[in-house]
Image (cartoon, rainbow, N blue to C red):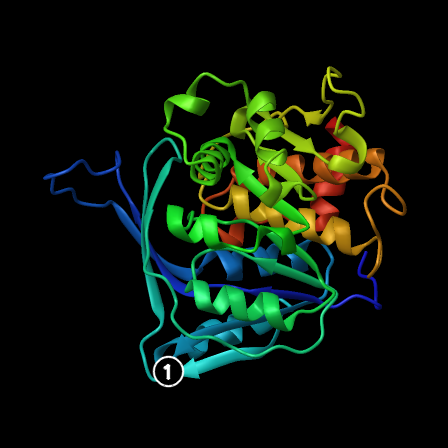
Amino acid sequence: MADKRCSCTVRGSINHDEYFHVNHIVRPGETLSSHAHESRIGGKGANQAVAIARAGGRVRFYGTIGKDGTWIRDRMVDYGIDVSGIIIADDPTGRAIIQVDDKGENSISRPSEQAAGWFLETTHLLLQNEIHMHSTHYALRNAQNAIVIMNPSPLPSRAEIRDFPWHKVDWLIVNKAEAQELYQSITASGAQASASMSTRELIFLLSAQSAFIATNIVCTLGADGVLAFMPAFHRPKMEHETPSFVYLPAAELLDVQDTTGAGDCFTGYFVQGLVEFGPNAKVGSEIKEQDIAGILKTCVYASGMCVEKRGTIDSIPTRAQVEERLTLHG
């Protein structure tokens, strides 16, 4: 569970999410009535911070809300989050419009957050890409010696990708489409360059780029599970040697209700899994390949359970619930 030597910081977005439940995702030019509406806390940063807390972790959150969003800060406290890094600005709280159809699929539209921030010392730093890039750079500069985990969603522009200090990122969490766009941006290649690649080939070639040469890459595959490449374990020693990976299939689902929060749930549980190895644990020494496989199995089950309930934060299971499911089906 929580390691008292560790301080996990999430620097990210925190929003007022408005859910509109519809029969299908609205098409261009179409006007569609919703059959239900809900207001909840959102933002990838806030979602992932709550997931860390639900996984048993101690987490600080740094972000910005408006004066109309003090209820959001209060709710974050209720979830067990240290909110000393939340700034209340004059601008209104960020807002996201989320459509959820009858099959549980979603479409999300949200603006990026604008404020920068400040940092105390931390051992683990989690970043996304729903805040302005200068705020992300600020976090990287001020979280010295921290283990950095980044889930760059939504992806930066190609120019921002090429200019980003990826060498400062210890763990990259992406889906296949994001991995393809990163590869195309870094190599200045077209979509055709990666379209025919298998996921394993894509992740290996991405990891071979100088920007990611020392970065551990976790690629989530939705219903197909998760694939991880860690240079310490998987980079071939010989020129013609085939690279290896850690692969886990998706958890068996009881019923799909809403996929909105699955990725953030996965990321939060993954970060907490790393935190539990302590502040200076390194892959290849203190952290073994089977340790990462164990963390990923927990993440797969947690995110699978997440889609069985509606909502984002409210659908994230507790650690006890995940462990019970693992005991029954793992």
Query: Alpha-carbon neighbours of circle 1 within 10 Å: few (<14), some, or many (≥20)?
Result: some
Whether residue 224 is situated above or below residue 216 in the rendered picture: above
**On the rendered image, what quadrant is the N terminus found in?**
bottom right
Secondary structure beneath dot 1 equals helix
Whether residue 160 is situated above or below residue 208 in the rendered picture: below
Q: Is residue 266 visible?
A: no
Which quadrant of the structure image shows residue 110? bottom left
User: Where is residue 150 drawn, in percent x and y?
Assistant: 58, 52
**On the rendered image, what quadrant is the C terminus found in?**
top right
Depth check: 146 or 317 in front? 146
Mark 1 belongs to which amino acid? Lys
User: Where is residue 240 drawn, in percent x and y?
Assistant: 73, 15
Depth check: 286 or 69 in front? 286
Seen at 35% across and 78% down, the residue is: 68
Judged left or right of residue 257, residue 95 is left
Which quadrant of the structure image shows residue 216? top right
Seen at 52% across and 30% down, the residue is: 222
Depth check: 299 or 247 in front? 247
User: Where is residue 48 drawn, in percent x and y?
Assistant: 57, 55
Q: Residue furthest front?
A: 239
Q: Is residue 268 visible?
A: yes
Label 1 sits on residue: 67
- Number of marks drawn: 1
Judged left or right of residue 27, residue 70 is right
Seen at 72% across and 17% down, the residue is: 242
User: Where is residue 194 drawn, in percent x and y?
Assistant: 45, 24
Judged left or right of residue 221, residue 329 is right
Whether residue 280 is situated above or below residue 36 in the rendered picture: below
Judged left or right of residue 225, residue 328 is right
Which quadrant of the structure image shows residue 50? bottom right
Seen at 42% across and 53% down, the residue is: 160
